Amino acid sequence: MKNKKVLVILGGTSRERKVSLDSGKACIKALKKIGYKVSSFDPRKKSLNLIDQNKTDIIFNALHGKDGEDGVAQSYFEFLRIPYTHSGIISSYNAMNKIISKEIFKKNKIKSPEYFVFEKTNYNKLKLHQSIKKKK
């Protein structure tokens, strides 16, 4: 297993880029320490479809947030037929979509707090209402 070439995907374009860079660098350090051949790839610099399949045995997904945990990156990895760490495409999408997650919990009788949904238009109206109340 230690002869495997691990490609750590880190950084990305989401608002969680800094966290992804930090966790990705920590993963690289740990993997190298135990003897793996490790390289890195930042989708902010190059598109995921440019991953070299010949230089990668497995992908360690250290991306966070949009395009990293929502099934987008996973769809590239599966298209390239490279095994990867993380949930699959559909599981990732469902987990990032909190409304879908809640419905899955309810359907499977998994206890979860009550919730309600703010649409963006409602949120903007609520913010406007709150700022008017504060000015009074």
Image: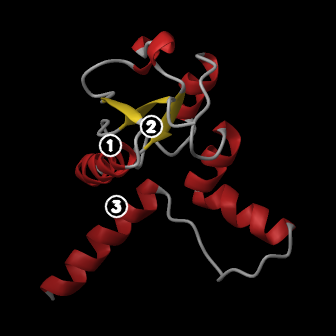
Mark 2 or 3: in front is: 2
Q: CA distance from mark 3 to mark 1?
A: 22 Å
Q: Position of residue 17 (x, y in %)?
A: 27, 46
Q: Is residue 107 left or right of residue 130?
A: right
Label placed on residue 38:
none
The amino acid at mark 2 is: Asp
Q: Secondary structure at mark 2?
A: loop
Residue type of the residue flagged with mark 1: Ser
Scheme of image coloration: secondary structure
Specify the label residue 14 is tagged with: 1
Above or below: residue 57 compared with residue 122: above
Q: Which image quadrant: the N terminus?
A: top right
Residue in the image at 43% along x and 43% along y:
66
The image quadrant where one finds the C terminus is bottom left
C-alpha span from label 2 to label 3 = 25 Å
Instruction: Please tell me which of labels 3 and 1 falls first in the chain.
Output: 1
Point out residue 134 in the picture as x, y percentages from the top left corner.
Answer: 18, 85
In the rendering, at what x and y percent does residue 133 appear? 24, 84
Q: Residue at point 50% right, 64% down?
A: 118
Q: Which residue is mark 3?
A: 124
Q: Are marks 1 and 2 in contact (CB under 8 Å)?
A: yes
Residue 67, label in figure: 2
Determine whether 12 is above or below 76 in the image.
Answer: below
Q: Are marks 2 and 3 in contact (CB under 8 Å)?
A: no
Q: Nearer the viewer, residue 5 or 26?
A: 5
Residue at coordinates 32% horizontally, 43% vertically from top-left? 14
